[in-house]
């Protein structure tokens, strides 16, 4: 089949949105600027010949390097200053501090290394733009709409796009065309690599740097929930009429690579329904804070740490937040003094009753089932609360009980709590489709959420 024929077949297929920053191997530094820049402190300016780069390891962020040749600067005094302004082309890139300084052959020849501790924006970000391109590192693989990528050598097409849209904005996210090779580099080396590119556009008017911050914050929290591990958009490029006006290299919260389980599966067809509800909740300040806190606790408990006992405590704190926000404040299932008297296990049971989840331990959790039977607990909520109490309370008797609990029981109790959190948030977001069940017999089987029942081949909520 000839190239022209293939192009004809794909003429209505949208083109890839490339990431504004590309990486071919994990943890490769991103160049921001090469040349002369200024360090400004109070009324003095120091010329630096060097470069500015975004590094991933050991701590990600924008770093500046260079040499100073002057008799006027007291480098020891500058090292105590935390808000040195870094000026590039007469515009402030950001502020930061010097990490290290080394003298060359003379005391006037000094090499420095520093870090931008707050923002790092190259160009004039006060100018409004009609789209903002961005990159996403360490984000799991999803499939969606068909897109194409045309080069002189090849024509690619794949189901690599998903779109998040609400009344005000459209966010288009495309998986890198060489995702599998990039992910292999990430899996082999750990750390970070760019796996997706995307674009934000407004349905009415232009985008400003300041207003877009809230949109991207919302998107970052949402993507972290999909991912099961913290990820954030990076390297925002403000574009007007196809001209890049500013580039944002500010560091954001991203976790280095680690495989984790999560509820989402590879089909992205229902992401937009979730996004609509999520971004609608985000409009209310209290609901926004609820989403931020709950999802931060969720990804932390889901991080496969070497100390699952701490994750159990955090997971039950997240369940307490779910209970208060959803059951008490929004559903108002309990009011008055009764809200203060209910114990922790009953709070979890009330949550489960809204999710159509039984109180017993899942069939696959044999160790937890045995633990419940041996200790004559009523059900799984009582068991996980007792495990949490043994962890939190440090009396000798509690410590003995904790030491007697098998590691597998701790693991299964944690997975159960994380599952409860996932189901609670998905129900709040009115999700009614398939998901990966971490507690299923086959582990990560795809099935309907518990509040959806299949009857005669059709689903009802």
Image (cartoon, rainbow, N blue to C red):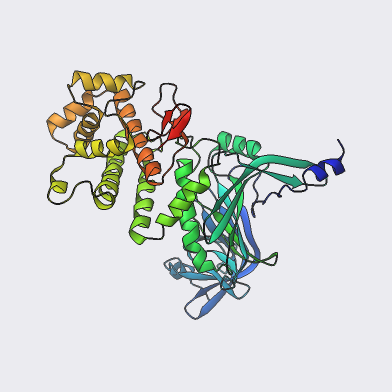
Seen in the picture, residue 316 relative to 91 is either above or below; the reply is above
Residue 454 is situated, as x and y percent measured from the top left of the image, at 43, 29
Residue drawn at the location 59% of the way across and 69% of the way down: 206
* In the foreground, 458 or 391: 458
Q: Quadrant of the C terminus?
A: top left
Residue 5 is situated, as x and y percent measured from the top left of the image, at 85, 41
* In the foreground, 209 or 398: 209
Horizontal side, residue 10 vs residue 455: left or right: right
Residue 136 is situated, as x and y percent measured from the top left of the image, at 56, 49
Q: Residue furthest front?
A: 456
Residue drawn at the location 70% of the way across and 49% of the way down: 14
Residue 70 position by quadrant: bottom right
Residue 371 position by quadrant: top left
Residue 64 is situated, as x and y percent measured from the top left of the image, at 56, 61
Q: Is residue 253 visible?
A: no
Residue 451 position by quadrant: top left
* In the foreground, 361 or 109: 361
Horizontal side, residue 459 vs residue 184: left or right: left
How many badges with numbers are in the image?
A: 0
Q: Quadrant of the N terminus?
A: top right
Q: Is residue 83 visible?
A: yes
* In the foreground, 109 or 356: 356
């Amino acid at each position: 089949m000839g190239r022209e024929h293939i192009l004809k077949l794909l003429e209505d297929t949208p083109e890839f949105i490339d990431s504004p920053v590309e990486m071919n191997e994990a943890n490769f530094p991103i160049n921001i600027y090469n040349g002369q820049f200024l360090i400004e402190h109070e009324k003095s300016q120091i010329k630096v010949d060097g470069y500015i780069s975004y590094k991933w390891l050991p701590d990600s962020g924008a770093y500046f390097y260079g040499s100073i040749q002057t008799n006027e600067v007291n480098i020891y005094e500058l090292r105590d200053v935390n808000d040195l302004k870094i000026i590039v082309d007469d515009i402030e890139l950001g502020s930061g501090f010097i990490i290290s300084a080394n003298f060359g052959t003379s005391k006037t020849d000094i090499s420095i290394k520093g870090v931008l501790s707050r923002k790092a924006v190259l160009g004039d970000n006060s100018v409004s733009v009609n789209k903002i391109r961005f990159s996403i590192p360490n984000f799991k693989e999803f499939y969606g709409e068909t897109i194409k990528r045309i080069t002189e050598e090849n024509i690619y097409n794949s189901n690599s796009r998903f779109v998040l849209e609400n009344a005000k904005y459209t966010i288009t996210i495309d998986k890198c065309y060489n995702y599998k090779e990039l992910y292999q580099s990430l899996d082999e080396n750990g750390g970070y690599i760019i796996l997706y590119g995307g674009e934000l556009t407004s349905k009415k008017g232009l985008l400003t740097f300041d207003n877009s911050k809230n949109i991207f914050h919302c998107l970052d929290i949402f993507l972290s929930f999909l991912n099961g591990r913290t990820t954030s958009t990076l390297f925002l490029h403000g574009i007007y009429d196809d001209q890049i006006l500013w580039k944002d290299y500010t560091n954001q919260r991203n976790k280095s690579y680690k495989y984790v389980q999560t509820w989402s599966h590879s089909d992205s067809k229902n992401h937009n329904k979730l996004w609509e509800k999520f971004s609608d909740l985000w409009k209310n300040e209290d609901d926004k804070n609820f989403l931020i806190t709950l999802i931060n606790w969720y990804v932390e408990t889901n991080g496969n740490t070497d100390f699952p006992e701490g994750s159990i405590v955090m997971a039950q704190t997240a369940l307490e937040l779910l209970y208060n926000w959803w059951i008490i404040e929004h559903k108002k299932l309990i009011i008055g003094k009764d809200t203060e008297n209910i114990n922790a296990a009953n709070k979890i049971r009330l949550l489960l009753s809204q999710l159509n989840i039984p109180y017993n331990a899942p069939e696959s959790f044999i160790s937890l089932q045995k633990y419940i039977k041996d200790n004559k607990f009523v059900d799984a909520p009582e068991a996980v609360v007792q495990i949490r109490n043994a962890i939190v309370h440090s009396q000798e008797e509690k410590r003995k009980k904790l030491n007697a609990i098998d590691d597998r029981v701790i693991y299964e109790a944690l997975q159960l709590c994380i599952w409860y959190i996932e189901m609670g948030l998905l129900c709040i977001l009115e999700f009614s489709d398939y998901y990966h069940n971490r507690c299923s017999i086959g582990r990560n089987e795809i099935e309907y959420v518990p509040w959806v029942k299949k009857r005669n081949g059709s689903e009802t909520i």
